[in-house]
Amino acid sequence: GEGRGKGTGRVGAVVAGTVSAKGVGKAWVRPAGLAPVPVPPCVPGPGCPVMSSNSFSDRRIIEVLAAPCKMHRRLVRTAQRVPEIILDSESGTDSVASSADLYGSLALDMGMNLTSGWKQDAKQDWASYYVNSRSDIDFVVDMRPGVSPSSVAERFVAKGHWHMVGQVQVHKFASTQFTLLGKFNDEGSDDEDGKASEEGCLSDAKEAKQAENDEDERKNASAKDEGGNDEDSRSTSSTGDGKNECKQRSPRVSEVYLDITCIENPTHFKRFRKRQKAFREVFTDARTGVENQFGAQGVLAFDAYIHLLKAFAAKVPGNALTGFQATCLGLFTLQIGHFRLKPIHSIALSFFEGFLRFCLFFYGDGPQSWSFNYRQFAIDLSQGGRWLPRMSTGWRSELYFMQVEDQMKCRPDERVNVAHSLDPHRVCVEAYALLQRAFTGDHPGSMFMGQGAPMAVPAAPVPHS
């Protein structure tokens, strides 16, 4: 899920608390999957003592930014019940939908296969999920012909303590999104099933310590960061096709937000599903590439990096950058190798600094702007990451999974631009502010150029729509 509250301000406090500004590493590293780059001996690599000593910082990032384990279990339990409600036949009648698919942050960890070699011998000792305290549950539903989307929401209202807090209809994609808040009638307490924790959760003792640390960090961040926004102002853009209105009510401890996108056109539903699959493949490939390069440390760093990206998006005001958009941009910066490992930083913080500098220059309009700028180039996450010419001047910026769009033979006006709502100026300003605050080893105006600089990938000309 995109997350409900905007800017808790914790990202600045977390980064500032784990970054030192005493020196700058000089080595470039490009992730696996791109053209190989010679790695000088001074580059910290897998098992390097300098980088290993900073793995605590990456663990700390996850402890602070990830949702408490009990909240994660509550989201998982609820998500497991949702298809039962949507697809169940009532009183001999047909179900209201043909299928119901989970997507978003919760789907990433629930579908993550624990097949890595290092996990066979060592248990992962950090939270193996990407939900945070603002995350919700996202489902997309393939409606049966002739059935009104409202019937889905009505089922939840009838079967549990649910009420509808938002509704958005997007005619272009034949979709209606309902946002509900509540819980099921028979939902047990978190304490009742504490022993049946989800795979990858921390132990009970570590979980208690994590909750204590989370609370301390929340208090410290609230006092330190003057740029935070109201956590109760909730806004999402689940599919990239529409945007919910803000919700003003804070959920009770046992309640969760549930976004259900009902699609009435089978073609649009299949396209939605394929786009989500394309995202998951890029996400998994990036995680695997980092693991191949850095081992277990790399997986830890990647997970911490994703939490940093989502926290940064929450800090950007006015819904100018969603968590999904930030994640896609962060994956692209890994694809093109736009980061510099520094001995004074953990791997995740090195990734994150590269992301911030990318946002500063790609979305900047100053005299030092990058030759690769959002006004001239679109981002494509397909085929290992590449630049494309701008598709349409109707968008401020563009980001696509172009390979799947081409495979589905979508017309230019049918493609989904992930960056449709992104505000380049605001993202640039916020990236600059955080760089000044937390990454002062380099001047905020310095670019990561040189051996690891991204190169344009030739693309076939695309007619402007």
Image: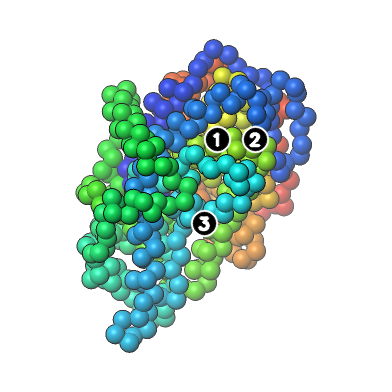
As helix, strand or loop, the secondary structure at mark 1 comes to helix
Amino acid type of disc 1?
Ala
Q: Where is residue 120 in the image (x, y as percent from the top left)?
A: 61, 47
Compared to residue 84, the image places residue 349 above or below, namely above
As helix, strand or loop, the secondary structure at mark 2 comes to helix
Amino acid type of disc 3?
Gly
- Mark 3 touches mark 1? (CB < 8 Å): no
Dot 3 alpha-carbon crowd within 10 angstroms: few under 14, some 14 to 19, many 20 or more? few
Task: Find the residue positioned furthest to the top.
Answer: 22
Q: Can residue 453 be seen in this view?
A: no
Label at residue 111: 3
3D distance between C-alphas at marks 2 and 1: 9 Å
The residue depicted at 73 percent of the width and 46 percent of the height is 458
Q: What residue is disc 1 on?
A: 301
- Mark 2 touches mark 1? (CB < 8 Å): yes
Dot 1 alpha-carbon crowd within 10 angstroms: few under 14, some 14 to 19, many 20 or more? many
Closer-to-camera residue (376/320): 320
Q: Quarter of the image holding residue 351?
A: top right
Dot 2 alpha-carbon crowd within 10 angstroms: few under 14, some 14 to 19, many 20 or more? many
Amino acid type of disc 2?
Phe
Q: Where is residue 293 in the image (x, y as percent from the top left)?
A: 68, 37
Locate residue 357 relative to residue 232 in the image: left or right: right
Q: What residue is disc 2 on?
A: 294
The residue depicted at 30 percent of the width and 74 percent of the height is 151
